Amino acid sequence: MKKTIAVLVMTLALSSTVFAAGTQYIMRVDGLACPYCAYGIEKKLKKVDGVKKIDVDLNKGLVIVNVAEGVILSEEKMKKLFKDAGFTYRSMKQKPLQ
């Protein structure tokens, strides 16, 4: 019984790291002033395949996007997306999701 529980715990631990794989992009954007702005950005980003989570920090002018493993958000693509939405893309940092 103890062996079965140990195997189950190990399997769950390994599977959770598989699901957590991916990349987080932190983008600085000018022009984010209200919740409607955030909604407009979220709507555009949700159309990008592999986007899992979107957070917009209006006070800091940040858009934080988590994507699935293997998905890459290029600077050129993000510049165009934000420009088309009426905002100014400034910069982007990325880090692996844990």
Image (tube, rainbow, N blue to C red):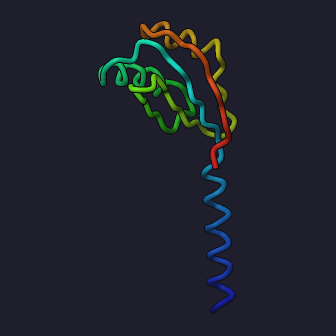
Q: Nearer the viewer, residue 26 or 4?
A: 26
Position of 93 relative to 17 (above/below): above
Q: Residue furthest front?
A: 59
Picture coordinates of residue 55, whole percent (x, y): 44, 34
Q: Quadrant of residue 22?
A: top right
Q: Nearer the viewer, residue 92 or 3?
A: 92
Q: Nearer the viewer, residue 97 or 13?
A: 97
Picture coordinates of residue 53, whole percent (x, y): 48, 38
Total of numbered circles in the picture? 0
Residue depicted at x 52% and y 13%: 81
Picture coordinates of residue 44, whole percent (x, y): 44, 20
Picture coordinates of residue 48, whole percent (x, y): 53, 25
- Quarter holding the N terminus is bottom right
Please state if 63 lies on the left or on the right of 90 as rendered.
Answer: left
Residue depicted at x 42% and y 7%: 86
Q: Residue furthest bottom?
A: 1
Q: Quadrant of residue 77?
A: top right
Residue depicted at x 42% and y 21%: 41
Please state if 6 lies on the left or on the right of 88 as rendered.
Answer: right
Position of 83 relative to 47 (above/below): above
